[in-house]
Amino acid sequence: MPRPRPARFPPQARIALMPPLPASRRRFLQSAFPLILPAAVLGRAGAVAPNSRVRLACIGVGGQGASNLRAFLADERVQVVAVCDVDARHRERAAALAGLGAKDCHNDFREVLARADVDAVMNATPDHWHACVAVAAARAGKDLYSEKPLGGSIAEGRAICRAVEENRRVLQCGTWRRSGMKVRMACERVRNGFIGDLKTIEIGVPAAFAVRGGFTGMEPPEAVPPHFDYEMWLGPAAAKPYTAARCHFNFRWIDEYAPGYITDWGAHFLDVAQWGAGMDDTTPVEVEAHEVKRRAQGLYDAPEQFRIEYRYASGVRVVMASTDDKARWGTRFAGSQGWIFTESEVLKASSDDILRAKLKDGDIRLFESRHHHRNFMDAVLTRGPTAAPAGVAQRAATTCQLGAIAAALGRPLKFDPVTERFEGDAAANALLARPMREPWRL
């Protein structure tokens, strides 16, 4: 029999302040590295001076973080000045890639944020760390390239938005499909009525798990290797015995850290859905999860298969379903006069006329970014817009997390996009935030 599913975020979940460094270390960092550079040094409104190179620190440099690092190193306007990771092997590889010495390799991200020679940070930590790093970075006066989903919960995403706004920071979320030409073309054709009235959006994401490293999820506890700061990796998450199967890429198969592909791939495709539907400033009002399958034993307990149905106040329906059919991985917009499908470099439609049609004067034209990482640097230097700003990313992440909550509770839910709460549903509202282990806070 499948094991019962406990509430993922218990009622005592709360958001507060982050812990300080030890007093001796804090005094050293404050004397060595003023937390925020004066505006006269940074440029107008806290910006990097327009003719300067952006001094970037990369936090979390394994997997996607290493990919981001390479992309930024290819931008002539960027100087990578520091790397940070709780795995010494990741730090060493990243430092070699960036040409850095030992003094610019950090285990604790707070040391990075205390450096006066850091203008911006790339945050590619595991999902349960996204908000702590992002909020602290914004408060430290750093601009942010932050991986998706924006936060690990609805409340965390909103906390990031507040911190970015209050501190006038630039944020680019790692939902890079917004910088894809064919994705933008698809969304513009939907927004301009080329498929008629939009009715339904169908999203396909992979079923089951692409588990890496030969892990099964049944691994027993083991000794923490000397190169890995496991306590710091856990951070705000609950203390649990170490096993390599828990960490790095495979954290996403453990419901405590992330609900599998609901947020992993869903963060990309639900973002595209909202962009094409013109719903970047809202979220669904109803959500229900069906056909949810999880493993009954072992570490890996996040949903492996699912079908999640959303309804927006406009009447548009979105259906996100797991599938083994790779041809269905992506976003399909269906309207009263046709359909259009997009995923990365793929663009298909029910009629070639839809694809050949040109936009006219007065038609809706969406924000154009040809390179996600370069667009972030453009914004850092000019204080201009990013393709995936905090508010937009938060709404897309919220839509993912609504699906995860519906999958956890196993019943239909009603959500208010304005208050960002469930209507008269204490059990669902208890899952809006995740608990944070002492002493970590936002």
Image (cartoon, rainbow, N blue to C red):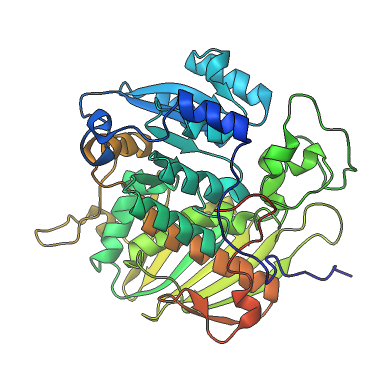
Q: Is 126 or 49 nearer to us in this picture?
A: 49
Q: Is residue 196 left or right of residue 268?
A: left
The quadrant holding residue 321 is: bottom right
Q: Is residue 73 left or right of residue 87?
A: left
Quarter of the figure with the N terminus: bottom right
Query: What number of labels is visible?
Result: 0
Which sits in the foreground, 163 or 67? 163
Q: Is residue 145 above or below residue 58?
A: below
- Indicate the position of residue 364 as horizontal and vertical percent values: 19, 61
Residue drawn at 52 percent across, 70 percent down: 319
- The residue sitting at the left extreme is 361
> Can you give x and y, in whole percent of width and height, for residue 434 in the image?
63, 61
Q: Is residue 62 among what the camera can see?
A: no
Side (left or right) of 191 relative to 341: left
| Position in image of residue 232 (x %, y %) | 68, 38
Query: Would residue 347 be seen by someone viewing this image from the given angle?
Result: yes
Q: Nearer the viewer, residue 108 or 56?
A: 108
Q: Residue at x 27, y 31 (%)?
A: 42
Name which quarter of the figure residue 229 lies in. Answer: top right
Q: Position of residue 82 (x, y in %)?
A: 49, 23
User: Which residue is depicted at the point 39% across and 81% down?
Assistant: 313
Q: Does 53 sit above or below residue 260?
A: above
Q: Residue placed farthest to the bottom in the image? A: 424
